[in-house]
Amino acid sequence: MSIFDLTIAEAGKKLAAKEISAVELTSAYNDAVTALNPRLNAYITVTPELALTQAKAADARIAAGQAGPLTGIPLAMKDLFCTEGVRTTAASKILEPFIPPYESTVSAQLLAAGAVILGKANLDEFAMGSSNITSGYGPVENPWKRNGSDAKLVPGGSSGGSAAAVSARLALGATGTDTGGSIRQPAAFTGLAGIKPTYGRCSRYGIVAFASSLDQAEPMARNVEDCAILLNAMAGFDTKDSTSAERAVPDFTKALTKGVKGLRIGIPAEYRLEGTNPEILALWDKGIEWLKAQGAEIVEISLPHTKYGLAVYYIVAPAEASSNLARYDGVRFGARVDGVDLIDMYERTRAAGFGTEVKRRIMIGTYVLSHGYYDAYYLKAQKVRNLILRDFTNAFDKVDAILTPTAPSAAFGLGEKMDDPVTMYLNDVFTVPASLAGVPAMSVPAGLNAEGLPLGLQVIGKHFDEETVFAVSAAIERAAGFSALPDVRAK
Amino acid sequence: MSLDAATVRRIAKLARIRVDDAEVETLRTELNAILGYVEQLGEVDVEGVEPLSGGAQMALRQRADVVTDGEIAEKILANAPDRNENFFAVPKVVE
């Protein structure tokens, strides 16, 4: 067995038992990153020396008997989390020179737990994308290949670098963020588990803002248990985030063995979209059977406003983005392009610093917030958003959790679906509604398609009931027995 | 509703993004595709529905109006593209 076969839980036990050292583990991962990152481009910035220093500190902590489950565990940090003294780009050229003078709360909590940070993972620019092709630092290659083909596939997005890193074993786990599906869809595309917790569960402090009413930090890992271990450390109340929830964080690992006996699982009719890939629908049916066989009750439900989710999202998210990204003005931080006067400097800086997709979204957001269009677009979208929330609230009167596919397809090729922005946006059709409602949702690897690519199922839960989401996800994981590995990986 | 080239230029101006003439037509087509897609919200009846502005199921918290940090000018200015002592420097605004 290779050191790369260990999960976070298993590595934690071996570290605690001193069968391996944190320095050994980190060195192995540093070497794997050196070998494979030039090809996969999963990391924008690597920090091998810093990782070794952290690993040495972790070994000292283990020796002193003060270790926790994440002490000495090498992770990838999405390059959207500000890390003190380590460049943070949000995959944008406009932040190329930015070295944060402070640490995000989530990364600080992981460091306090003794985690080792291998580097900053690639993403879509400002997390705007579903395939990691909008990164200002080049696309990420999905470590998975179609059977008998060497064609490059996308890892999904926006947390595509995190997904590729964990999947190719260039990290044991990773942080991501999810605004409309940015961790669940890449997790599904790379055979990983990833949970978007309830809005407010993890602090947004120090996460480069995209759409503040949607952005959530979350973990991505090789299995459900590892996600629970990571979320335990990442979650919690923070006075520095005004929308942080002031409530106790349970031990999520305790929920893993709860089982689904007696749980009511909702199957929303509206997710059977016309034209959905039959393989995805077949996997969904399998998931239903797995849960039924473990004692869950299956309940047909309706989420009638599902089809409007994407349209709401593509008004609300750009509107918030246009406001959040106004800060990139070439004055206080980031890149600057000189102009003849102040306005010209702003305009040239932003034209050169932002990529095409980011400009497009800022402009859509500017338009829907502008005088005369605010009510027709933004206010209307906020009202439909309330109806989507109401759909979930009504459904959760009848069920404990909801089961759906994660994405409408498996990973697609680099260069596919790029003809127009709307086709790309459709990737998020199953993940956006839970983001808009703020409810927790997890993607679990559940099978392979005929081409050998992983597919995921999504479990959606009630506000602040991540425990049921973990219980149902663990049940699916047990039944699916997903053990396939990507072609490109550290061995 | 379909955006014309002048509106695209106006939005770009509001967003403080310099747009070359060559880019206007592409942007116009792309923005219209997105706006065309979101048009479908027109068919939803939202009579009497309150707008939902946030993801949090709670009222925003208030904190005591007290100073909680400060004296970190060096940290704040460390990333400035241009500075003059403890100030951010910008092109001349007033003649």
Image: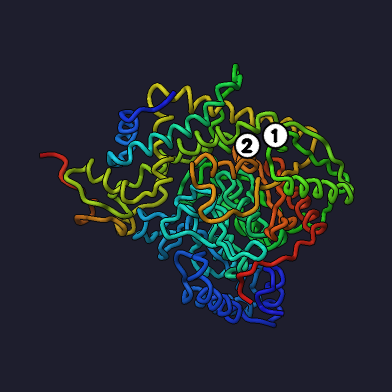
The residue wearing badge 2 is A437
The residues tagged by marks 1 and 2 sit, at their Cα atoms, a distance apart of: 7 Å
Q: Does the CB distance between marks 1 and 2 fall below 8 Å? A: yes
Which residue is rendered at x = 59% and y = 31% of the image?
A385
Q: Measuring from the top left, give residue A264's x and y in whole percent.
A: 83, 40
Residue A491's spot in the image, x, y percent?
64, 77
Residue that label 1 marks: A392
Marks 1 and 2 share the same chain: yes
Q: What element carries label 1?
A: helix
Q: Is A166 left, or right, of A335 in this rendering?
A: right
Q: How is the image coloured?
A: rainbow
Q: Is residue A58 left or right of residue A344?
A: right
Horizontal and vertical percent position of residue A325? 39, 44
Mark yes or no: residue A481 visible. Answer: yes
The residue furthest front is A148
In the rendered structure, the answer to whether residue A260 lies left or right of residue B4 reads: right
Chain hosting mark 2: A
Q: Residue furthest top?
A: B47
Work out whether residue A424 or residue B73 is closer to the camera in this orientation and state it.
A424
The numbered dot on residue A417 is: none
Please provide percent x and percent y for residue A379: 50, 25
The residue closer to the viewer here, A434 or B95, is: A434
Q: Please name the amino acid that badge 1 sits on.
A: Phe
Q: What element carries label 2?
A: helix
Query: In the rendered view of the protein, which quadrant contains the N terminus of chain A?
Result: bottom right
- Quarter where residue B27 is shown: top left
Asked whether the viewer can see residue A228, the reply is: no
Q: Which amino acid does label 2 sit on?
A: Ala
